[in-house]
């Protein structure tokens, strides 16, 4: 009887000891398990580069963000979000499947053609408005004085009547008579008479009278009630702002004439390319639907203004237009033949945009690629300047980069994969 009790007591003690051992082990591993299951951050399942410290929905697709646990990343990176500079390992077979092609960064002078879209504009130095020098009425429009008509310098445009025009003619004749028959007096009086005549002549010119008309007035000494306004230069009438029997005010623009034998072309050049184009550089203009027709142009000296709408600089080109083929507001293709200074260059497709950074995948051998952050310069043709981040001769991936980038993003924190 005692033996049974002793035996039962022994079994009970053994079972109790086992339970203590189990609880002891569980208590020892609980912190480690909790660490491994600790959520470090949440990521977009479709675009792993997007991470968040809190759960929620992905901004691009609306899917629930998936947690990333401490057990899924390297111990040294347990408290950091994924980095784009992780090495990615891709086996040769998978490289072939992804279309990865290798090359090298080169020290070279990139040559190529910079293409831009240009718009024909008027040469501001060859625009001649006909401005009303006084108040008046239009009595007659000269035939052929319509928009688009070609006119010669001195050609009649319009006849007007106004008190200002009549008064100016009389003042000129009085000053002319005083100059032709000077009264006896000191030299200062003679000088004043000559000054009055020059002033009266200047008033007539500002009213729109040409040299021939002023000479005719001086010869006949007859005031005309209807004053004929003539073209100040040869060119094309761009706008006509008056009609017969219309009243106009001083300062009104009656006609606008421009010489189109020399025009400007404003080429849209991006911020990165604007520094490549300098005063005096030559360019070729190609007219749409007329590929055989080319114009030679030169970059003007004006400072290119910035257009906030298109976010481009307007580079001004000066072009001779003898046959008047180029018309205001026409669009043309502009080609600049440029050569960049010697620098490290890579194929343009080797550089990918990753957020705010530009990345080149450097081949480290054995299927290992390093996503290298670089600073780029100008692009000419299919070559891109590398200002910082690469050395000449380094092997790089020149195609399949976006797939390599996807590989690295789909496995953040891992040292590589096959």
Image (cartoon, rainbow, N blue to C red):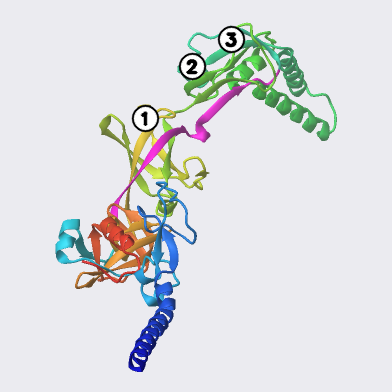
The 10 Å Cα crowd at callout 3, few under 14, some 14 to 19, many 20 or more, is some
Q: Residue at x 82, y 24 (%)?
A: 183
Magenta region, residue range: 110-134
Find residue 179 and report its image quarter. Answer: top right
Q: Nearer the viewer, mark 3 or mark 1?
A: 3
Ranked by sequence position, the earlier of labels 2 and 3 is 2
Q: Which residue is mark 1?
A: 322
| Coordinates of residue 301 in the picture (x, y in percent) | 48, 47
Q: Quadrant of residue 350?
A: bottom left
Residue at mark 2 to residue at mark 3: CA–CA distance: 12 Å
Front residue of this view, candidates 79 and 246: 79
- Relative to 314, 173 lies left or right: right
Task: Give the quarter of the figure containing the C terminus.
Answer: bottom left
Q: Position of residue 331 (x, y in %)?
A: 38, 32
Residue 147 image label: 2
Q: Can you name the residue that lies furthest to the front here?
A: 1
Earlier-in-chain disc, 2 versus 1:
2
Residue, disc 3 = 243
């Amino acid at each position: 009887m005692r033996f049974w009790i002793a035996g039962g007591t022994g079994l009970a003690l053994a079972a109790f000891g086992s339970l203590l051992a189990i609880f002891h082990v569980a208590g020892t591993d609980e912190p480690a398990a909790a660490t491994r299951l600790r959520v470090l951050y949440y990521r977009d399942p479709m675009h792993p580069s997007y991470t968040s410290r809190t759960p929620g929905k992905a901004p691009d697709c609306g899917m629930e963000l998936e947690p990333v646990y401490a057990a899924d990343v390297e111990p040294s990176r347990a408290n950091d979000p994924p980095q784009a500079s992780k090495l990615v390992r891709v086996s040769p077979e998978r490289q072939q499947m992804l279309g990865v092609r290798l090359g090298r960064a080169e020290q070279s002078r990139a040559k190529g053609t910079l293409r831009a879209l240009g718009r024909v504009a008027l040469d501001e130095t060859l625009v001649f408005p006909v401005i009303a020098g006084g108040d008046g009425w239009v009595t007659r429009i000269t035939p052929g004085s319509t928009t688009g008509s070609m006119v010669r310098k001195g050609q009649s445009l319009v006849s007007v009547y106004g008190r200002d025009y009549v008064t100016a003619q009389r003042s000129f004749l009085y000053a002319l008579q005083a100059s032709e028959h000077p009264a006896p007096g000191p030299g200062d009086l003679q000088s004043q008479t000559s000054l009055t005549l020059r002033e009266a002549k200047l008033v007539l010119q500002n009213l729109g009278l040409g040299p021939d008309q002023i000479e005719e007035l001086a010869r006949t000494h007859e005031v005309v009630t209807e004053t004929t306004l003539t073209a100040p230069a040869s060119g094309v009438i761009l706008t006509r702002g008056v009609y017969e029997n219309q009243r106009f005010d001083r300062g009104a623009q009656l006609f606008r004439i421009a010489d189109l034998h020399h025009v400007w072309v404003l080429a849209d050049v991006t911020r990165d390319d604007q520094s490549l184009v300098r005063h005096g550089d030559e360019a070729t203009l190609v007219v749409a639907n007329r590929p055989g027709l080319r114009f030679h142009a030169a970059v003007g000296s004006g400072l290119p203004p910035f257009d906030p709408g298109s976010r481009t600089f307007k580079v001004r080109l000066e072009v001779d237009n003898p046959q008047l083929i180029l018309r205001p507001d026409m669009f043309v293709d502009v080609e600049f033949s440029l050569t960049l200074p010697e620098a490290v260059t890579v194929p343009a497709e080797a550089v990918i945009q990753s957020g705010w950074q530009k990345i080149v995948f450097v081949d480290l051998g054995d299927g290992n690629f390093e996503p290298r952050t670089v600073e780029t310069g100008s692009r000419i043709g299919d070559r891109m300047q590398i200002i910082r981040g690469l050395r000449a001769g380094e092997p790089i991936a020149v195609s399949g980069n976006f797939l390599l980038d996807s590989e690295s993003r789909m496995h953040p924190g891992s040292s590589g994969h096959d």
